Amino acid sequence: MHYDGMDKKGGSIYSYLDDIRNNYPNKYLDAFKKAVEINQKSLYSNY
C-alpha cells in the first residue's frame, strides 16, 4: 500500500481501514481484515 502512495500511519493497523475502503475494492478490504485478524491471533494467542 505504501508503494501505491498510501501514507504510513502510526498506531493501530486498523487505522488503515478507511484508506483501504476508499482506495481499493471491497475484496481487498476483506482480505486485509482477515490478515490483521490472523496477525492479532498469532501475536496474542496462547496456542
Image (spheres, rainbow, N blue to C red):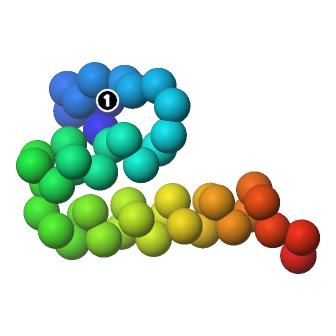
Instruction: Decide: is 39 above or below 20.
Output: below
**Residue 11 coordinates in the image, percent (x, y):** 51, 31
Q: Residue at x 36, y 68 (%)?
A: 31
Left-right relation of 33 to 5: right
Instruction: Decide: is 17 above or below 41.
Output: above
Q: Residue furthest bottom?
A: 47
Instruction: Decide: is 30 above or below 24.
Output: below
**Image quadrant where residue 34 sits:** bottom left
Q: Quadrant of the C terminus?
A: bottom right
Left-right relation of 36 to 38: left
**Image quadrant where residue 43 sits:** bottom right
Q: How many marks?
A: 1
Say which residue label 1 marks.
2
Closer to the camera, 21 or 28? 21
Closer to the camera, 32 or 14? 14
How crowded pointer 1 is (Cα within 10 Å; few <14, some 14-19, many 20+) is rated as few
Closer to the camera, 26 or 4? 26
**Residue 46 coordinates in the image, percent (x, y):** 89, 70
Badge 1 marks a residue whose secondary structure is loop
Left-right relation of 33 to 4: right
Q: Amino acid at mark 1?
A: His
**Image quadrant where residue 7 sits:** top left
Q: Residue at x 20, y 42 (%)?
A: 19
**Residue 4 coordinates in the image, percent (x, y):** 21, 33
**Residue 40 coordinates in the image, percent (x, y):** 64, 60
Q: Residue furthest right?
A: 46
Left-right relation of 26 to 12: left
